[in-house]
Image (cartoon, coloured by chain):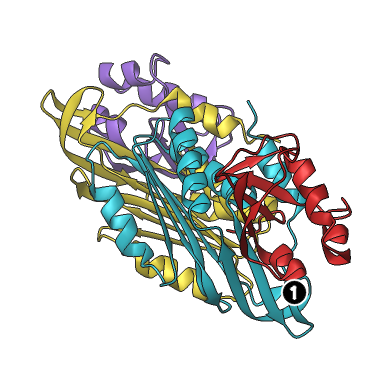
Chain colours: A cyan, B red, C yellow, D purple
């Protein structure tokens, strides 16, 4: 149950190895990497800048991890989210979940990503060939969050 | 009462403020009342809080709705729908 | 759309980096690692030996990947499965899926794992403190496969 | 007709065979008929194919059911439910 907000890049191989070797009852590791795409809404993206609400971000992500742990049998989870200015192919976010069983690991990992997308206070501004603009929130992300309602 | 207000992203740019501490009149005790109070500052503020665009509010790092109560010393934040991940 | 059956271990960090950097329209990478647990059915596991049906294994995994690509918008997928004798904490299987969007990547990755579990011809024999035994197939895995039926 | 038969895992151990090529009588043309034919080899074979345990069959690397037709040159495989991953 760890949250890291950082400017620097992260090493997914290193993080996954640390997570999976932490406990011999781990049988399953589900993980997700989000990265900057070169094209968004049909325009070429040159940079993406991430702003966040320090303090609230960490609190909201810890709450999401706790809810995932409450719903599924997971052993540990890790969320890393970058802030600052990124370029296409740069990593933005990593979510890793360990569990004895794959179903729990997969569900918890997707749950954390869906809630991170709609609850954690990050905002993206992109510089494109059509100018600088704030990325708009997507209804599809609200729908993805809503389907987890018990 | 004294509160702190934070603005983020598109909203920070619209009002050209990121953080302020203000002394609120005692009758301003909800998010809705605070939005109406701030709208008196000028057209850009009134336009921002007119309801035409979705604005989220948080009190002390928790998402809240418009009816939430503000207390002395609270940290209130206004921001657009989030787009992380 | 790659399948590798191998005795050697694999480097998840390397594989994920290759996959995510292959195409700048990739925004999402979902992945799964399965590893040997120290305890199975209440007995301590010392080794796990994987046997497979060479030829049919590759064919069945390629078919599963093709079906995933048919159902979701994915850019690429990779399945690595080890054979031979492994120990607790050893990696057994890796599945990685790249896509523009996370929902497709998550679903395709979990789909591939669920079908791999019930369709690909691998068999596990474990050496435990209670003796040597073949691992029994689980009804829960059949259920996990069945829920994908359209 | 001539076919190849492969046995895996628990089944390979039960019959003590991993691969064989055999000449089938012309009336043996389905998986069920092949199982019955092999059951004549002795108790361990009869017991294996008695239906008490689940046995999967494949022809030329494709999972098939008991009614599937066997042709000359086919590679038939018998194995328990799979447990990879």
Residue D83 in percent (x, y) is at 37, 36
Q: In which quarter of the image is the N terminus of chain A?
A: top left
Q: D14 left or right of B78?
A: left
Horizontal arrangement in the rendering, residue C130 relative to residue A15 (left or right): left
Going 51% across and 28% down the picture, which residue do you hit?
A: C142
- In the rendered image, residue C32, in percent from the top left (x then y), is placed at 43, 50
Locate residue B44, reporting x and y percent.
84, 66
The spot of residue C39 in percent (x, y) is: 21, 30
| Image position of D49 with respect to A146: above or below | above
Q: Is residue C83 visible?
A: no
Q: Which chain carries label 1?
A: A
Q: For this rendering, which residue is in front, C139 or D39?
A: C139
Q: Name the residue under label 1.
A: A133
* On screen, residue C95 above or below A104: below
Q: Nearer the viewer, residue A28 or B58?
A: B58
- The C terminus of chain A: image quadrant: top right
Q: Give the side of residue A126 with respect to residue A88, left or right.
A: right
Residue lying furthest bottom in this view? Answer: A129
Which residue is located at x 67 percent, y 67 percent? Answer: B17
- Circle 1: element type: strand
Query: Which residue appears at 33% of the width and 38% of the height?
Result: C123
In the figure, residue D36 lies in which quadrant?
Answer: top left
Q: Is residue A126 above or below residue C30?
A: below
- 10 Å neighbourhood of mark 1: few (<14), some, or many (≥20)? few
Q: Nearer the viewer, residue D41 or C130?
A: C130
Residue C34 lies left or right of residue A58; in this view the side is: left
Residue name at image x 73 percent, y 63 percent: B11
Q: How many marks?
A: 1
Can I make out residue A138 in this image? yes
């Amino acid at each position: 149950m760890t949250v890291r907000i950082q400017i620097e890049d992260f090493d997914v191989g290193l993080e996954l190895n640390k997570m999976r070797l932490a406990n011999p009852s781990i049988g399953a590791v589900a993980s997700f990497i989000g990265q900057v795409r070169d094209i968004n809404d049909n325009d070429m993206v040159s940079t993406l800048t991430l702003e966040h609400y320090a303090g609230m971000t960490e609190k909201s992500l810890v709450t999401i991890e706790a809810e995932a742990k409450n719903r599924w049998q997971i052993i540990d989870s890790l969320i890393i989210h970058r802030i600052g200015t990124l370029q296409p192919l740069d990593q933005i976010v990593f979510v890793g979940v360990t569990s004895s069983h794959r179903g729990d690991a997969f569900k918890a990992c997707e749950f954390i990503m869906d809630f991170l997308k709609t609850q954690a206070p990050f905002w993206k501004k992109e510089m494109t060939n059509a100018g600088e603009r704030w990325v708009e929130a997507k209804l599809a992300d609200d729908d993805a969050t809503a389907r987890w309602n018990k | 009462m004294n509160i702190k207000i934070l603005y983020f992203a598109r909203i920070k740019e619209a009002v050209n403020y990121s953080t302020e501490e203000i002394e609120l009149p005692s009758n301003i005790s909800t998010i809705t009342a605070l939005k109406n109070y701030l709208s008196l500052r000028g057209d850009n503020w009134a336009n921002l809080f007119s309801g035409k665009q979705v604005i989220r509010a948080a009190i002390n790092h928790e998402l809240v709705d418009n009816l939430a109560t503000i207390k002395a010393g609270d940290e209130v934040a206004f921001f657009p729908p989030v787009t992380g991940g």
